[in-house]
Image (cartoon, rainbow, N blue to C red):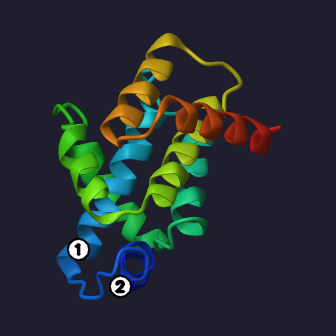
């Protein structure tokens, strides 16, 4: 469980001590942000969910078991309001600029997976970039890279 957190906060900004809670918070924050991107248009297709799982496994090192637990917890709370500020604040405090851009790129891939961009998906991406303290250029560059990766 510490591998992701060490990769995220271990060498990039000098933090070397991590706890189970740090790892859980990192995993939860990543999962929630990507799930909110998947649900930005009101639904999450199986293709989007599988892409989300693959992204969490491949890019962020989560195990399928951890993801299943986090997804089940998300489904229980689906009707509750998700406070993005809480999760983005954690990310801003613990992730490097490059890692935040990588997250934004992952968000764009999920949003663009179905081949069209709806207004509320675009709004979500802009709001998230603002909360992650990313510039408009970083947002657009992440979008272009994501689009290229999907083609």
Quarter of the figure with residue 54: bottom right
Contact? badges 2 and 1 (CB < 8 Å)? no
One can see residue 12 in this view = yes
SS category of the residue bearing label 1: helix
In front here: 145 or 30?
A: 145
- The N terminus sits in image quarter: bottom left
Question: Judging from the image, what secondary structure is the residue with disc 2 in?
Answer: helix
Residue drawn at (41%, 72%) of the image? 8
Whether residue 50 sits left or right of residue 43 in the image: it is right
Q: Is residue 109 above or below residue 122?
A: below
Query: Which residue position holds label 1?
Result: 22
Q: Tell me where residue 66 appears, x and y as whole percent.
A: 38, 70
Mark 1 surroundings: few (<14), some (14-19) or many (≥20) residues within 10 A: some
Front residue (pair 87, 139): 139
Query: Is residue 45 visible in the rendered structure shown here?
Result: no
Q: Is residue 22 left or right of residue 3?
A: left
Is 67 rendered above or below residue 61? above
Q: On the image, numbered disc 2 is attached to which residue?
A: 2
Residue that lies at the very extreme toward the bottom in this rendered image:
17
At label 2, counting other C-alpha atoms closer than 10 Å, the crowd grade (few under 14, some 14-19, many 20 or more) is: some
Give residue 69's position: percent from left, percent from top: 32, 64
**What residue appears at the point 70 percent right and 34 percent down from the top-left corner?**
144
Query: How far apart, in angstroms, are the residues tagged by discs 2 and 1?
Result: 8 Å
In the depicted structure, whether residue 14 falls above or below residue 25? below
- Residue drawn at x 18%, y 46% is 86
The percent position of residue 146, horizontal first and vertical second, equals 68, 41
Give the answer, above or below, for where 86 lies relative to 139: below
Q: Residue furthest top?
A: 119
Res. 90 image quadrant: bottom left
On-image quarter of the C terminus: top right
Tell whether 15 sits left or right of 129.
left
Q: Tag 1 or tag 2, which sits nearer the N-term?
A: 2
């Amino acid at each position: 469980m510490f591998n992701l957190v060490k990769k995220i906060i271990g060498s990039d900004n000098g933090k070397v001590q991590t706890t189970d809670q740090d790892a859980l918070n990192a995993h939860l924050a990543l999962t929630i942000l990507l799930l909110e991107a998947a649900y930005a248009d009101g639904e999450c297709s199986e293709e989007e969910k599988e892409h989300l799982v693959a992204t969490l496994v491949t890019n962020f090192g989560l195990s399928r078991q951890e993801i299943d637990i986090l997804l089940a917890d998300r489904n229980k709370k689906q009707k509750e309001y998700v406070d993005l500020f809480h999760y983005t604040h954690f990310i801003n405090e613990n992730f490097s600029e490059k890692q935040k851009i990588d997250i934004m790129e992952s968000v764009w891939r999920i949003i663009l997976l179905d081949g069209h961009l709806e207004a509320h998906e675009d709004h979500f991406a802009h709001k998230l970039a603002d909360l992650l303290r990313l510039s408009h250029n970083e947002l657009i560059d992440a979008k272009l890279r994501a689009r290229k990766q999907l083609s």
